[in-house]
Image (cartoon, rainbow, N blue to C red):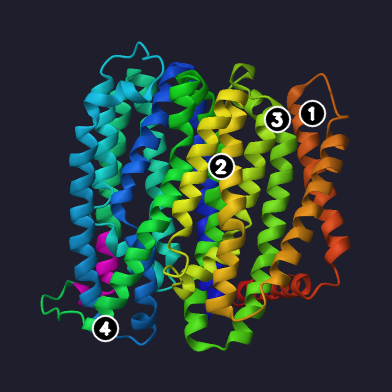
């Protein structure tokens, strides 16, 4: 049951993300053709400012999903109703605070921009960003109930449908009006509509949550929930500061145009993260169910398998980024939007290191281990800001990304697995570090080999060169990994899993 739920979640997630990514690429292509690079920079900058305001959310989301695992497994409707009432009130307050606080920053926008661009109505544009972020918290709390119930594929399907709708409408609006404000108003309307739609669906799946006779949450549950949320405040700070300050520092010390250039790379990075994250978020609820019902030994066995999958996926994608990133940007939006290879490499390294944390974080979320490393994000944030501010003066944009790298290596890389293994899985963490280092060395070697071979390809037609490089990226690392790991237990597990899935699909097809 857990495996089937995870697979269903994954199929819908990957399908939805794939369609959304394709449309986003088309939309961004049209965006850079109609509007200037300064609009791109403004888009990236305001998104970052609003991501900092999401600190108000205090990490309630992950704590909410975790708190629902057990009552859902036990079909404890009364506790679910009590929890949902608390979340509704909390999210309505959060959305309102974000709108008020965000709007109050409007007079100080020049502080974040080195050279103010010649764009009309910057204040209004920013307020539209604020309002879109604020209303995204209304109605959305019920989405967590669907995800915790191992039905993430439903939420993903809804999000994919509305993302496709948003991209199409925004693109049409931009082509017809050439108006960025109309473009943003469209986003607000679709955001609100999606949240209402997912709320209605949650009511249909769990009609009892609409009942008025809601009991107060027991004191022990309130204490547990408060503890997890208070711990998640620190985690939220770390996440927001590390991911949300890069564009602010680039805008302040280098320029808004560079923010625009980076935003194109960020579109690709975030799209890839979203696709890969679906794999781990699709199995989080199943792992949450696993740790409630199974032994530590079984949990550790699944952990090793997920880690192996984690490595293969992020290693392969990272190699593709090193080899293909600048070729893709050139074909997509043009050579004028390129970064040097050194910048591409450090962006990719950060992508890989963050990605390799996914297994640990997935199990941490499933086990609810937020309290034990609550101070880690504060050190991570401090290192990130200080290192980036110092290094940007000497190395430019590369320095900003090196600051992010240092903050991750000096904190998250070792603290997160240490906490998980000590308080959750109860195994020796030394084996984990040994495996991760081994995987990382293999990734570096394969990236160098693939890049050197792919770099020999240079036809007179850029798209042909790009296609050949894609084929090399598909063949070289994956063929080598099959040879290296063909006898590994985790490899055999996934091969058998794929065979079983294909067999079931074939069997079902014959019956129909």
Q: Residue at x 75, y 23 (%)?
A: 462
Spatial distance from mark 2 to mark 4, Cα to Cα? 39 Å
**Residue 327: x and y, percent?**
70, 28
Identify the main secondary structure in magenta: helix
Circle 3: is it few (<14), some (14-19), or many (20+) Cα within 10 Å?
few
Spatial distance from mark 1 to mark 3, Cα to Cα? 21 Å
- What residue is pinned by disc 2? 404
Circle 1: is it few (<14), some (14-19), or many (20+) Cα within 10 Å?
some
- What residue is pinned by disc 3? 342
Look at discs 1 and 2 and give the one toward the viewer.
2
- What residue is pinned by disc 1? 465
- Answer with left or right where residue 63 lies relative to residue 251: left
Q: Which residues are magenta?
A: 199-209
Residue 38: image quadrant is: top left
Spatial distance from mark 4 to mark 3, Cα to Cα? 52 Å
Circle 4: is it few (<14), some (14-19), or many (20+) Cα within 10 Å?
few
Q: Quick one: quadrant of the C terminus?
A: bottom right
Mark with earlier residue (4, 3): 4
**Residue 139: x and y, percent?**
24, 57
Mark with earlier residue (1, 3): 3
Q: Residue at x 22, y 49 (%)?
A: 95
Spatial distance from mark 2 to mark 3, Cα to Cα? 15 Å
Q: Secondary structure at mark 3?
A: helix
**Residue 246: x and y, percent?**
49, 35
- Answer with left or right where residue 337 lies relative to residue 51: right
Look at discs 1 and 3 and give the one toward the viewer.
3
């Amino acid at each position: 049951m857990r495996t089937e739920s995870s697979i269903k979640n994954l199929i819908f997630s990957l399908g939805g993300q794939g369609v959304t990514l394709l449309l986003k690429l088309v939309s961004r292509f049209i965006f850079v053709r109609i509007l200037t690079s300064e609009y791109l920079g403004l888009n990236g900058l305001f998104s970052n400012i609003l991501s900092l305001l999401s600190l108000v959310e205090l990490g309630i989301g992950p704590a909410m999903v975790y708190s629902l695992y057990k009552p859902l497994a036990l079909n404890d409707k009364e506790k679910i109703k009590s929890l949902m009432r608390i979340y509704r009130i909390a999210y309505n307050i959060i959305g309102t605070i974000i709108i008020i606080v965000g709007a109050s920053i409007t007079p100080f926008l020049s502080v974040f921009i080195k050279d103010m661009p010649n764009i009309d109505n910057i204040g209004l544009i920013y307020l539209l960003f604020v309002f879109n972020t604020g209303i995204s918290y209304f109605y959305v709390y019920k989405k967590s109930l669907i995800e915790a119930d191992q039905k993430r594929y439903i939420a993903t399907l809804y999000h994919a449908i509305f993302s496709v709708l948003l991209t199409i409408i925004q693109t049409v609006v931009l082509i017809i009006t050439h108006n960025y404000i109309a473009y943003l108003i469209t986003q607000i309307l679709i955001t609100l509509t999606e949240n209402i739609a997912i709320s209605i669906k949650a009511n249909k799946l769990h009609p009892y949550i609409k009942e008025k006779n809601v009991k107060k949450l027991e004191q022990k549950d309130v204490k547990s929930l408060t503890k997890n949320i208070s711990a998640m405040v620190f985690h939220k700070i770390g996440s927001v500061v590390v991911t949300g300050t890069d564009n602010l520092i680039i805008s302040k010390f280098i320029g808004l145009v560079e923010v625009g250039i980076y935003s194109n790379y960020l579109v690709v990075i975030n799209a890839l993260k979203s696709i890969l994250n679906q794999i781990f978020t699709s199995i989080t609820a199943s792992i949450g169910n696993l740790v409630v019902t199974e032994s530590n030994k079984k949990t550790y066995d699944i952990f090793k398998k997920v880690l192996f999958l984690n490595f293969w996926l992020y290693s392969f994608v990272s190699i593709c980024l090193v080899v293909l990133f600048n070729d893709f940007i050139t074909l997509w939006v043009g050579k004028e939007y390129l970064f040097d290879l050194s910048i591409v490499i450090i962006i990719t390294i950060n992508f890989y290191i963050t990605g390799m944390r996914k297994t640990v974080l997935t199990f941490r979320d499933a086990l609810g281990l937020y309290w034990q490393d609550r101070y880690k994000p504060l050190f991570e944030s401090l290192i990130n800001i200080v290192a980036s501010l110092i290094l940007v003066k000497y190395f430019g944009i590369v320095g900003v990304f090196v600051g992010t790298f240092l903050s991750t290596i000096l904190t998250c890389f070792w603290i997160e697995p240490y906490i998980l293994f000590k308080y959750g899985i109860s195994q020796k963490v030394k084996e984990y570090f040994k495996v991760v280092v081994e995987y990382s060395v293999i990734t570096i070697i394969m990236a160098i080999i693939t890049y050197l071979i792919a770099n020999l390809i240079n036809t007179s037609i850029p798209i042909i060169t790009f296609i050949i490089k894609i084929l090399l990226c598909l063949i070289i690392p994956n063929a080598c990994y099959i040879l290296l790991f063909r006898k590994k237990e985790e490899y055999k597990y996934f091969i058998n899993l794929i065979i079983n899935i294909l067999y079931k699909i074939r069997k079902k097809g014959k019956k129909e």
